Amino acid sequence: MQEVCGVGVTTGRWLDVGCGSGGIARALADHVQQIEGIDPESWERWPKFEAEAGNLRFHVGDCDRAEPPLQEAHYDVVVCNQVYEHVRDPLALLINIRRMLKKDGHCYFAGPNLWWPIEPHVFWPFVHWLPRPVAHRCMTALGSRRAVELDAYSASYFQMTRWFRDAGLEHRNMFPERLQAEFREGSGIGSAVRLVSGPMRLLAPVQPGFVFHLAHAR
C-alpha cells in the first residue's frame, strides 16, 4: 500500500467497509493511526477488538444505501475486501466509497471475477454462470450441501470498470503487482512473474479475482 499511496498513508484515517467480524480491521489497527469498520450487523468480536486496540471503532450500517452512513470526505484510505458481490447495489457501494474518501484518498478494492470458472465461495466450477435457481438445483442433485452458500453475485471485469466510471472513480489493476509480491525478490520465479506482468494486464478480464486501487477521477 505504501508503494502506491506514499509512506505517510498509515497516519491517516482508515475505514474497512463490510468488515464482518472485524479481523482485517483489527490486524490493520496495529499498523495505522486510526481505523473504523462498518458492517450491516454487529459481530460478537467487536467489543473485544475495540478493547485491544484503542484506535479501532466499529459501526453498524449499510454502505450501499442512497446516502453514505458515515461522514463524507473523511477517510484517507478505504478497504473494501470481498464485499461488492454480497450487496444489493454495488454501484451505490462505490458511489458511497467515493463520497467517504478524501479527494486525495485511496481505496483497496478486491473481489471475485465472474469469468473465472471456479466460484470462490462454494469452490464449484461454472455454477455462478447459471441462473441461481438452476445452479442450486444442480448442486443439490449432485449431492452438495453447499447450495445455500451460493449467495454471492460476481461481476465481470468490464462491468466492474463501468461501475467505477459511473461512480466517478479511476482504477488501477493491481493483480500483477500482488502476484509479484507473493514471490521473493530475486528468485527465478519472481523474475519470470515480473517479465510477464505486462502481458498479464491484457488478461485482466479472466484473472482469478480483482485487486484494484481506486481514487477520485480527475
Image: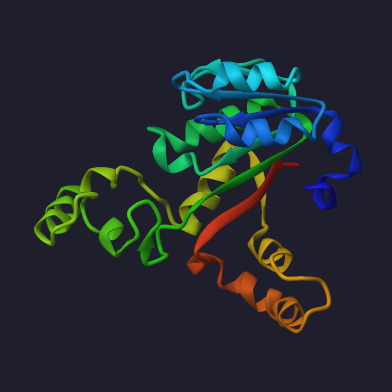
Residue 7, image x and y in percent?
90, 43
Residue at 75% across, 20% down? 55
Q: Is residue 109 above or below residue 39?
A: below
Asked where in the image residue 72 lies, by quadrant, the reply is: top right
Residue 80, image x and y in percent?
58, 38
Colour scheme of the picture: rainbow
Residue at 44% across, 20% down? 41
Extreme-right residue of the structure: 7
Using residue 185 as the reference point, say whether residue 206 is left or right of it.
left
Using residue 194 as the reference point, say whether residue 68 is left or right of it.
left
- Confirm whether residue 72 shows in the render: no
Residue at 46% across, 52% down? 159
Q: Relative to the observer, which residue lies in front, 23 or 97?
A: 23
Asked where in the image residue 101 lies, by quadrant, the reply is: top right
Residue 40, image x and y in percent?
45, 22
The quarter of the image holding the C terminus is top right
Asked where in the image residue 190 lies, by quadrant, the reply is: bottom right
